[in-house]
């Protein structure tokens, strides 16, 4: 670590400097190359799910009990492909926001260097998810047209705690899901391995996002906190509502209207979502970013 530089910083900046250096050291010690870590040539076992069945949007519903085993396998594969597609979409937004944030920053600082390391990670993750979907024989799923346009605005305008808050939301929600999938014995090995890679490397990204949010929000007044809280919540709503595309149900041979209705009323899935967001909500509350208007958006997608 550059102790000379660290010694010249004020205590708050020195803490950020040291934390970023630790993340850089961790990246150097433990990172993966998906092109060699994933067995892309292995055949797919037709009995393996795309994700743990418990994470399916229809698990526990009457429709789920009526589905054949093949329909369940097909649905979960399309669901995970949709989630991966949404991940690629947001990772492209993330990369642009981080690049804007670091434009002409101090190149010698470890937080600048880790930001570029994160961008490199996200590029590999996007290619990894794209190849996994291709391997499963599933075409890309896309967000709604309005969400794509909102994403354009968000990636162009979001700064400071709003940008890193949006990043943290996307990463935290997916992290809990993938920690479960990577241990699922019924889950396709290709999904288990890509989930493991993503979990390990995203854990550093989440620490960096939290670190940046704490630093950027420090000293902010009530009005700024209210505004930032609302924008982050709207971004979270857009991300989560696009994770599972409604077309996955038709792909599994289901009646889309009935499937959407039962998925929307599925208390089991809502409980899983709330539990996966518990730590995120605690952190946002700690920063004064869990306001009443923000809560209304989180509740709409069962994040609280």
Image (cartoon, helix red, strand yellow):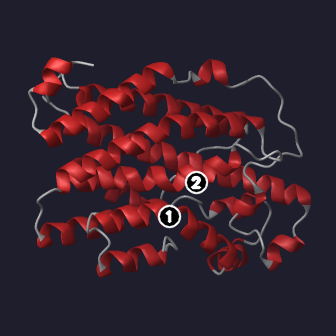
- Tell me the element at label 2: helix
In this picture, residue 148 sits left or right of residue 12: right
**Residue placed at 40% from the left, 66% from the top?**
282
Q: Quadrant of the N terminus?
A: top left
Residue at coordinates 74% horizontally, 62% vertically from top-left? 54
Where does the image place residue 275, in percent across and percent down from the top left?
Answer: 57, 67
Is the residue under label 2 in contact with that under label 1 (CB below 8 Å)?
A: yes
Q: Is residue 48 left or right of residue 234?
A: right
For disc 2, the marked residue is 176
Residue 238 makes an appearance in the image: no
Residue 160 image offset from top left, x and y in percent: 20, 50
Comparing 9 with 77, the one in front is 9
Q: What element does badge 1 sit on?
A: loop
Residue toward you, 144 or 202: 202
Residue at 23% in and 48% down: 156
Above/below status of 248 relative to 115: below
Q: Is residue 2 above or below residue 162?
A: above
Location of residue 5 (image quadrant): top left
The residue pinned by badge 1 equals 277
Query: Residue 55 in the image: x percent, y percent?
Result: 69, 61
Crowd rating for badge 1 (residues with CA inside 10 Å; few <14, some 14–19, many 20+): many
């Amino acid at each position: 670590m550059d102790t000379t530089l660290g010694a010249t910083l004020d205590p708050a900046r020195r803490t950020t400097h040291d934390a970023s250096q630790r993340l850089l050291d961790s990246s150097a010690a433990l990172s993966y190359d998906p092109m060699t870590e994933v067995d892309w040539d292995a055949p797919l076992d037709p009995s393996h799910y795309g994700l743990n069945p418990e994470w399916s949007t229809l698990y526990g519903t009457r429709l789920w009990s009526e589905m054949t085993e093949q329909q369940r396998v097909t649905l979960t594969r399309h669901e995970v492909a949709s989630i991966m597609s949404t991940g690629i979409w947001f990772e492209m937004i993330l990369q642009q926001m981080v690049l804007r944030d670091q434009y002409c920053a101090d190149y010698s600082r470890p937080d600048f260097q880790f930001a570029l390391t994160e961008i490199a990670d996200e590029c590999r993750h996007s290619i990894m998810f794209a190849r996994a979907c291709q391997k499963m024989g599933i075409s890309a799923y896309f967000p709604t047209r309005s969400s794509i346009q909102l994403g354009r605005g968000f990636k162009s305008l979001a700064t400071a705690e709003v940008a890193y808050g949006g990043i943290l939301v996307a990463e935290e929600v997916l992290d809990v899901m993938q920690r479960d999938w990577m241990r699922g014995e019924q889950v396709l090995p290709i999904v288990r391995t890509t989930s493991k890679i993503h979990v390990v490397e995203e854990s550093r990204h989440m620490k960096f996002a939290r670190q940046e949010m704490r630093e950027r929000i420090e000293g902010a007044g009530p009005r700024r906190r209210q505004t930032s809280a609302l924008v982050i919540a709207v971004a979270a709503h857009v991300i989560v509502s696009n994770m599972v595309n409604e077309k996955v149900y038709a792909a599994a041979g289901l009646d889309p209207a009935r499937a959407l209705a039962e998925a929307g009323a599925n208390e089991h899935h809502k409980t899983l979502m709330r539990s996966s967001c518990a730590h995120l909500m605690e952190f946002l509350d700690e920063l004064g970013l869990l306001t009443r208007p923000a809560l209304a958006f989180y509740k709409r997608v069962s994040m609280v």
